[in-house]
Each structure stands twice: as C-alpha cells, then as structure tokens.
Image: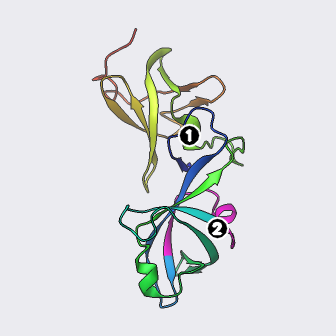
Amino acid sequence: MSETSKPTAPKPERVELRVARLVKAHGLKGGLKLEVYTDNPELRFVPGNEFILQVPQDSPWFGKKITLSSVREVNSSPVAFFQGVEDRTMAETLVKAILWVEHDPSTRPSENDAWFDHELVGLRVMRDRVDVGEVSRVEHFPAQDLLVVNTGSSEVMLPFVKDFVPEVNIEGGIVVITPPGGLFESAPDES
C-alpha cells in the first residue's frame, strides 16, 4: 500500500500525503475511530503531529489543521483524540474528514517495493516495450491498490500487484506492466 498524495506542481519542495479518514465518533470524550491509509502509522500518529483537514467548504473545520493528543487501540481499531475536540458532539463534526500530512518528497519509504503516490503519477506505462499510457493516479481499496492508467482514450484500472506490475523505475520514469489478457485490448495500441 502507498500513501495518497494530492496532485501538485512538478518537483515540489513538499507534498501532502493522505494518511487516514475519521470514520466515526467514539465515546463521550471526543475520540474518533481512524481508517488508516498509511503503511507508517507509528510515524504519522505520534502525539503532537499536525494534520491538514479535508472537509466540505461548509464545515466549521474547513481550512484548518488539527493536532493529535493521543491514539489508542479499541477493539483492534485505532481511536484518536485531538486537541480542542473535547466531546462527542464536537467529534461528530469531524466524521468523514480526511487527514493529510506535509511530507518531504526526498524521504523514501522504509521498505523495498514501496512508493508514494506522487512518485508514480506521471510515469510512462510500458507493456512489451510499447508505451500504453501514463499513471494518472493510484486508487486504494481494502483488497488491493489499483494503478489508474490513462491511455489517451480511456482509463484502465490495473491491480497494483507484482504479477501485473513487475517493475517500477522511478529514476527511469517508467512502470512495466504484464496485465491479464483483455484489460488493455480496448485501448489503442500506440506503436
């Protein structure tokens, strides 16, 4: 899994990474259950860390940041507490908010074969040494991540698994794919 990044200008000094969604209020003291999108929760969810909130424009939280006070496991799910969110009523105003963090793009994921979304977006996609398009975004689902490939005439969603994406070369600017039969056949062949 990789963290999602907001589209930004080329070679940004900093990018924003999507790390979680606030799913529902928990308890009476302002707790919020987290749906975690990051492979590095121990790095992202440290008391004192600040998050950029993605909420609708009519939300009282629009344009604001929020600081983590604490996080704990409740029934195998992380529950977060934030500064200034003192009760359930206030927590409910944050339900469905997306949490983003500022990230230095020169920092690499700690594991092999892991990339941030902003590193993948814009890479050329090659199949049998033929350019079939470029990565337009990465979609994250519970079962697996999907690379969304813009072929010029359509978008094709490809499971982001080693069998179908055997090579990612960030420095070379390409992703090599070996998709299942029929997935790219409706896309025009750019020979």
Q: Are marks 2 and 1 in contact (CB under 8 Å)?
A: no
Q: Is residue 36 above or below residue 30?
A: above
- The residue under the point 52% across, 65% down is 64
Q: Which segment is the magenta one?
A: 33-49
The crowding category of the residue bearing disc 2, from other C-alpha atoms within 10 Å (few below 14, some 14 to 19, many at least 20), is many
- The residue under the point 56% across, 80% down is 84
Q: Is residue 139 above or below residue 147?
A: below
The three-letter amino acid code for the residue at tag 2 is: Phe
Q: Secondary structure at mark 2?
A: loop
The crowding category of the residue bearing disc 1, from other C-alpha atoms within 10 Å (few below 14, some 14 to 19, many at least 20), is many
Q: Which mark is residue 45?
A: 2
Q: Position of residue 65 (x, y in %)?
A: 56, 65
In the picture as drawn, the residue positioned furthest to the top comes out as 191
Q: How is the image coloured?
A: rainbow
Is residue 40 inside the magenta stretch?
Answer: yes
The CA span between labels 2 and 1 is 21 Å
In the picture as drawn, the residue positioned furthest to the bottom comes out as 28
The residue indicated by pointer 1 is 118
In the image shown, does 178 or 23 lie closer to the viewer?
23
- The residue under the point 47% across, 33% down is 164
Left or right of residue 120, residue 134 in this image: left
The three-letter amino acid code for the residue at tag 1 is: His
Q: Which mark is residue 46?
A: none
> In terms of sequence position, does the residue under pointer 2 or pointer 1 come before the other?
2
